[in-house]
Structures are given as C-alpha cells and as structure tokens.
Image (tube, grey):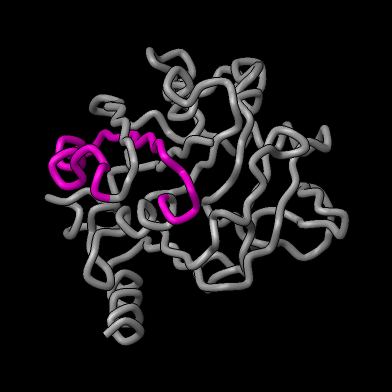
Amino acid sequence: MKALIFSAGKGERMRPLTLHTPKPLLVAGGKPLIVWHLQRLAAAGFSEVVINTSWLGDQFASALGDGARWGLRLHFIDEGGTPLETGGGILNALPVLGDAPFLVINGDIWTDLDLAALPHAPHGDAHLVLVDNPVQHPRGDFILHGDGRVSDQGDAARLTYAGIGVYRPAIIDGWREVIGDTPGASAHPPQFGLTPLLRHAMARGRVSGQHHRGRWTDVGTPERLAQLDAQLQSRHG
C-alpha cells in the first residue's frame, strides 16, 4: 500500500512561520512534522510515499531527498500555485497512487498512531481514524457507530476526523456529480474538497472508522506547534 501525505496547503493560520517554510516542514521535537510521518510509515512497512506540494513546494525535495534515508521512495507532485484541496489532490495523485487502496495522512498533524494497525483494504470506500474532539473543534465531524460504520447524520456524539484514512480510488468516482457546480470544479486540474465525497459514501454505508485514543495534535497555529514541541522535547529529551 502506498501513502499520500497532504502537504500543499499555504498554512495561512501558521503565519509568520509559514511565510518562508511550508507547514509540514516546521520543526517539532527536533525534526520536521513530515519526518515524523515518514519514520512512522517506514516502521509500518510502507515503501512508497506520494507528497503533494504547492506553497514553497521546492523545499520538500531539498529537505527530504529521495527518501532513501528512511528506506522509502518519495514521489513529489507539484500542484502549481494554487493547491487542489483534498479531493482534487487525490484525483491529481491517482496516476501515481495506482488502483489499490492507499493511506492518506495530513502533513500538519502529529500522532502516535500505529499505522501498521490500519486495515490495508477498507470494506467500503474509506476507513477513517477519528479522535476525541479538541478544544478548537468541540462539535466534531462524524459519528462512529458500534458496528464500525461512520455517518454524518444523527444526534449521537461526534468525533473529529484525525486527517488519517485508508481510501479506495473509488472514493473519487463520480466526483463531478457529487461536487456539482462549485468554485474550482471546472478548473484544470479541478480543485475540490474530499468531505462531500465522504458524506456521499457515508450515506451509502461505505465508510468505516476507528477511534484512536492515543496522542494526536492538529498543528494549526504557532501556539499549538510550540506546545507540541515542548511536549516532544520533554518526552524525548
């Protein structure tokens, strides 16, 4: 199974730190956020990783090389000056990802999740990792049912999508009908988010999930980056 690390965002909430450094290359605990992912992917048995880039994208290859130091082969996909968002990013990367299920992980999170424990093939179109709702996102995103299904409808308590999931390429099938005439859909290449496609798949019972109760941080602000850095320095110092 290949992995895709989303790394194309502009990191506007992280400014001024991201004025000269893309967010996944910001350092916490002595190493860039994306390096934590690469190390965990290598430890979990992955061999090929796709990294989509846009903002300051030329810095990734310079910082990471070809991945050989971790026993990985890295594929960099430049999305141009405007990021294609999550759905468009997957669509654009499919020629490299291939026809098999693949792992997606956001480049701006940190977690102790054992990636090797994730299913290599979801029963439906996607298998999502969900976490307890952080302070900055108290309402959560989706409902995890007792049978492992994930849905978007109902009054049950919600959990937050961790930015980690195993997807089949079929998640993108029919994206134009699902997305409709939204801004960016007619661009070349198209720009659209993944969430509407996930909700569409959930409505058909084709999304499963699991609750990760370990450590997880959405590194969305300079303050949260500083907190994570202090925690990691203390833990590994």
Could you say where residue 110 lies in the image, as x and y percent from the top left? 42, 63
Residue drawn at (70%, 57%), measured in percent from left and top?
210
Could you say where residue 3 lies in the image, as x and y percent from the top left? 46, 39
Q: Point out the image quarter for the C terminus.
A: bottom left
Question: Foreground residue, 59 or 115?
Answer: 115
Question: Foreground residue, 222 or 65?
Answer: 65
Residue drawn at (30%, 50%), measured in percent from left and top?
70
Vertical comparison of 159 with 201: above or below: below
Q: Point out the image quarter for the N terminus.
A: top right
Q: Which residues are magenta?
A: 42-69
Task: Using residue 229 as the reference point, say whether residue 88 is left or right of it.
Answer: right
Question: Foreground residue, 83 or 237?
Answer: 237
Residue drawn at (29%, 31%), measured in percent from left and top?
76
Give residue 114's quadrant in the image: bottom right
Residue drawn at (57%, 54%), measured in percent from left and top?
116
Could you say where residue 228 lies in the image, as x and y percent from the top left? 35, 74
